[in-house]
Amino acid sequence: MELTGASGEVKKLEWRVFRAKETPVRTAIAGVFIAAFLGFTFWYFGVLLAIVALLALFVALHTYFLPVRYVLDGEGITVDKRIFSHTYPWDQFRRWFRTTGGVVVSPFSRRTFLDNFRGVHLLLPRDPAAVLAHLERRLPARKRGPLDTEGRRATMDAEDSQDETETTKE
């Protein structure tokens, strides 16, 4: 999973995630629903719209039904989804945080609603320790909480105390 250099640091970290193979029961249930939907579409709307529905479902679900390969190296993060592959340079990212099924690497230094739109979501392997350690070395985590409430509370307390002193002077 990783290649180390002479100094002991990880030069390249690579893993593959194939959710359809990892959860066969969920895949079978999803397959039944997809087949039923495509059968319904074919029966009521015809062949053309069934093909359009098949293409739309493939685009929406390809990261589940096809393996995704991730590479973290000196260049950046490479995500290969079989349909397209893209390399994101490390200088694009400021921080990372864990999600339910993986990690989001964000270009923002603070939490924002744009994290999920501008960041890159990496699905984690079964043993994510090496990936998390590599990300920690590349992008050290901030010491504040996930909502950055301590920093906001400190500035709000300072602003509130200024407001109180101004009102007492009057």
Image: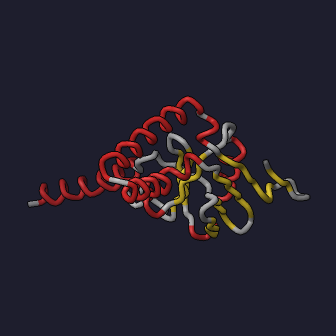
Residue at the image position 85 percent from the left and 54 percent from the top: 4
Residue at 66% in and 42% down: 125
Q: In this view of the protein, which residue sits in the foreground, 33 or 111?
A: 33
Q: Decide: is 68 above or below 94.
A: above
**Left or right side of 27 for 49:** left
Q: Is residue 105 left or right of residue 151?
A: right
Residue 166 x %, y %: 16, 60
**Which residue is at the far right?**
6
Residue 99 appears at what percent x and percent y?
50, 44
- Answer left or right for 51 relative to 26: left
Q: Nearer the viewer, residue 156 or 51?
A: 51
User: Image point 55% across, 57% down: which residue?
Assistant: 105
Q: Residue 18: x, y in percent?
A: 64, 44
Q: Of residues 33 and 161, which is closer to you in this image?
A: 33
Give the colour scheme shown: secondary structure
Q: How many marks?
A: 0
Residue 160 in view? yes
Q: Could you say which quadrant of the image residue 27 lies in?
A: top right
Estimate the x, y position of residue 100 in percent, counting from the top left: 50, 40
Residue found 74% across the figure and 62% down from its top: 73
Residue at the far top: name it: 25
The answer, for residue 142, to whether it is visible in the render is no
Q: Quadrant of the C terminus?
A: bottom left
